[in-house]
Image: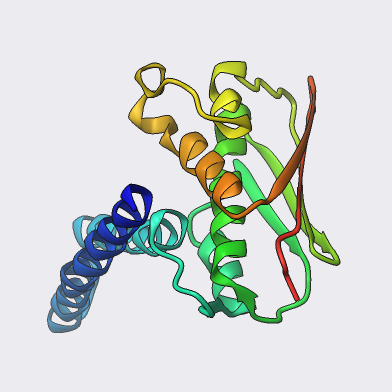
Amino acid sequence: MRDDLTALVSSRICHDLISPVGAIGNGVELLGGFSGKTSPELELIGESVASATARLRFFRIAFGATPDGSVISGAERVSGTDDIYDRRMTVVWQTDRADWPRLAVKIAYLALMCLEKALPLGGEITISKSGDDLMLDAVAKKVAADPAHWSHVEGPAALDSLAPASVQFAILGDNLASNSIRLKTAFTPDRAMLVFSDLQLG
């Protein structure tokens, strides 16, 4: 019940913030339209608004509730990563554009956030699927997987050892346990592989 409530709160916060952030973006566009040109200041505000909106949408899926039967389209899940990951860390989806259960996309997004922490110099993460298995394959100049972080994915661990910036590890672990999803991991100095089984990807 506590985890469900936390997810609902996350959904509510993201939902309520998207509208005012979007309104700021509309205001920037209007100001640019009135003047006939865009100043560096307006461009900076516009870029910040776009970044904030993209992160809110991403976080709403990663941390929010997953109602039974809800799905996310292929276009939405791909744009969700394209809008926040840049050339330093790229995400490539080698899957079809069919709808996925919202829970599956949530797991993929949380896993991306976990892998991001393990790639201090950036890298490329390829997402693919085989049946009901979801695979994330990260290639980078350096892979630094902190065992203390990944212990939260493997099972319950003391939260006092986890910083707010790493909360995705505990949330991923809770979601795997509560949905009977199995995970296999493999880490080398320049590669990381995550394989999630029994995700019912369709």
- Report the front residue among 181 and 116: 181
Q: Compared to 92, does 158 lie above or below? A: above
Q: Tell me which corner region of the image, top left, top right, bottom left or bottom right, holds residue 99.
A: bottom right
User: Depth check: 6 or 19 in front?
Assistant: 6
| Residue plotted at (54% across, 29% down) | 152
Q: How is the image coloured?
A: rainbow
Residue sitting at x 20%, y 77%: 26
Residue 106 x %, y % = 54, 59
Q: How many marks?
A: 0
Residue 115 vertical placement versus 62 (above, below): above
* Quadrant of res 81: bottom right
The residue furthest right is 130
| Residue 13 located left or right of residue 151 | left
Left or right of 158 on screen, residue 85: right
Q: Is residue 120 visible?
A: no
In the rendered view, tell whether residue 40 sits above or below residue 138: below
x, y percent for residue 61:
45, 62
Q: Is residue 75 visible?
A: yes
Residue for point 74% across, 32% down? 140
- The residue at the point 39 percent across, 32 percent down is 165
Q: Is residue 46 left or right of residue 149?
A: left
Q: Residue 190 at x, y = what percent?
A: 79, 26
- Asked if residue 130 lies left or right of residue 177, the reply is right
- Quadrant in the picture for the C terminus: bottom right
